[in-house]
Image (tube, rainbow, N blue to C red):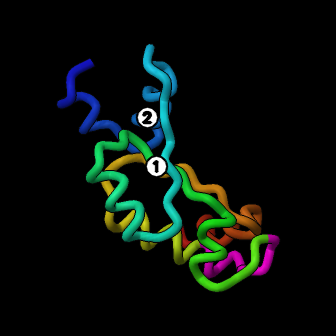
Amino acid sequence: MSNTNINTMNSFEKFSNLHRQSEVLILPNAWDAASARVIQEAGAQAIATTSAGVAWALGYADGYKMTAKLNAQIADSIVRVISVPLSVDFENATAMILLWWQRI
């Protein structure tokens, strides 16, 4: 598959195709927008988040201390600065999904 075709796909298709390639998909973990951008610039094909890393970077202990709204804001800030797919692992994910659906 050419780079041109990959660039025209949406993030879901890109992420799905990365799982089907012959090479192992490595998902470096970001904890904020700046770390995500650095990871992308280092050559990552996709990025994941770390719920503990995000929580600790904001001064919260890991373990459902952050609100779903705050988690959604962090995810939005990361998505704004990267062009590769993002896999989100946040606490309160069920509530966060509901917030995103309400936004659509």
Residue lying furthest right: 63
Residue 49 sits inside the magenta stretch: no
Q: Secondary structure at mark 2?
A: helix
| Image-based side of 69 in relation to 26, left or right | right
Q: Name the residue tied to disc 1.
A: 47
**Residue at 49%, 47% in the rendered image:** 28
Q: Residue at x 65, y 56 (%)?
A: 89
Using the image, tell me which numbered label, if any, was put on residue 78: none
Q: Mark 2 or mark 1, which is nearer the start of the sequence?
A: 2
Q: Is residue 64 magenta?
A: yes
Residue nearest the observer in this picture, 102 or 86: 86
Span colored in magenta: 63-71
Badge 2 is on which residue? 13
90 shown above or below 7: below
Q: Quadrant of residue 90?
A: bottom right
Callout in the foreground (1, 2): 1
Task: Give left or right: position of 75 versus 45.
Answer: right
Report whether 81 appears left or right of 86: left
**Picture layout, residue 87 above or below residue 45:** below
Residue 59 locus on image (x, y percent): 64, 85
Q: Determine the residue positioned at 47% across, 40% down.
A: 12
Residue at mark 1 to residue at mark 2: CA–CA distance: 15 Å
- Quadrant of the drawing holding the N terminus: top left
* Mark 2 Cα-neighbour bin, 10 Å: few <14, some 14–19, many ≥20: few
Query: Quadrant of residue 14 in the image?
Result: top left
Residue farthest to the top, as pictured: 22
Q: What amino acid is found at the position of numbered circle 1 in the picture?
A: Ile
- How far from the left and from the top, in percent, is residue 65? 78, 80
Query: Label 2 sits on what residue type?
Result: Glu
Asked if residue 21 is positioned above or below residue 29 in the image, the reply reads above
Residue 64 at x, y percent in the picture: 80, 73
Residue drawn 21% across and 29% down? 3
